Image (cartoon, grey):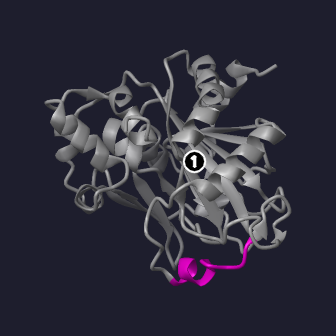
Amino acid sequence: MTDFEAIASALEERGFCVVPDFLSRSEIDFLVEEFDACPDSEPAPRTKHGARHLGDQPIDRRTASPAGPGQTAALRTTAVGRKETFQGIRPRMEAFARELTGAKAALYQILYLQTPVTNLPVHQDHEHFFLTEFNPTHLNYWIPLVKPSRTEAGRHLIPWDRLGEKSPRLFNLCRRSGASFMRSLRDGGTVYMSDWSGVHWVEEDFEIEDAMETPEVGPGDLLLLSLNTIHATQTTDDRRLAVSLRTCDPETRIDWHRVAGISTPAMMRHLAGQNPLSFPVFQHIQENDFGSTLGDIVPTLTGEGE
C-alpha cells in the first residue's frame, strides 16, 4: 500500500522520492510502444553531442542491445506524448496526484527523454515555473522505461536538506523558486544564474558534486520530483529511455501580464521561439481576454482539444 504521507514528507524535505515498481510491465510496454508513435517535440539538436548520436541503429528497448529492423526506432530527439498516450496513462497518474497532494490534478505533459542524446546540465525546470511560479501540487514523475543499469544513465539530484547544510544562501535562492542553472567554476566554487529574476550569485565554497545524489532506479521505478527540484542528466553513453509525466492543479490561475513582464533573455527566447508550452498558453489566453487557468489549456497541450 502506497504511503502518501511519507512521500509528501520526502518531497518537502528533500525534493524527491523513489517509489519502486510504480509501473506494471504492461504499462511500461504501452509507454514504450507510444514512444515510437509520438512526434518529436523540437528540431534535432545542433550540438555535437546530440548530433553525434542521432540516427544510430535501432535497439531493443528491453535489453538496450542491437535489434532487428522494425522492432524500434533509432535514437532521436525528445518526443512528446500524443493524445492516445495521455488517454492511456491519465487515470493512473491523476489518481496518484490527487491522493498525494489533496488537490485536483491534471496530467498536462508527457516527455520522452533518451540518453546519450539528452544531456541536461544542473538546473531547475523553466517552462512551467515561468507560467505559475512555485506550486507544491505540481509534480514531475520521471520513470525509466529501458535502463541497462540501476546505477547508470539516471538523474543527479541536489536534495534540499543537503543544499541547506552546504550553502544556506543557495538554498534560499532556490527553495521556492525555479528556472535557474548552476555551473562549476574552473578554479572552484559554483555560479548560480536565475532566468526568472536575473540574479547571478557566486558561491566560492560550494561544490555541486559534494551535494549531489544519484538515486538507483530501474525500469518502472518512479523518481518523483517537485517541479523545482535541482537536477541534471547522469552523463553516459548507455542508451536509456525514460518518460517524464507532469501533473498540475488545474485550478491554478495564469497571470499572463506578470509572465510577459519577465524580461530575462531566457524568457524572451521562450516567447519569441514559440515554446511548445508557453506559446499555446499565450494563444489561448489571448483568445480568452487574458483570464485562464492551467485546466483551461490542458486540452490544447494534450492534443485533445483538436
**Residue 86, image x, y percentages:** 56, 37
Residue 10, placed above or below residue 77? above
Secondary structure of the residue carrying numbered label 1: helix
Q: Quadrant of the C terminus?
A: top left
**Residue 155, image x, y percentages:** 66, 56
Q: Between 143 and 225, which is closer to the camera in this rendering?
A: 143
Residue 151, placed above or below residue 293? below
**Residue 287, image x, y percentages:** 17, 35
Residue 120, placed above or below residue 45? above
Q: Between 202 and 230, which is closer to the camera in this rendering?
A: 230
Q: Is residue 226 shown to the viewer in this render? A: no
Please say whether residue 50 is one of the residues in the magenta stretch.
yes
Residue 225, placed above or below residue 8? below
| Residue type highlighted by circle 1 | Leu
Q: Is residue 88 shown to the viewer in this render? A: yes
**Residue 162, image x, y percentages:** 63, 45
Q: Give the labeled residue for mark 1.
A: 163
> Is 94 left, or right, of 276 in this rendering?
right
Label count reads 1
From which residue to which does the magenta span run?
A: 48-58
Q: Residue furthest front?
A: 70
Q: Pointer 1: residues within 10 angstroms few (<14), some, or many (20+)?
A: many
Please say whether residue 117 is one of the residues in the magenta stretch.
no
Q: Residue at x 59, y 47 (%)?
A: 244
Q: Residue at x 30, y 60 (%)?
A: 266
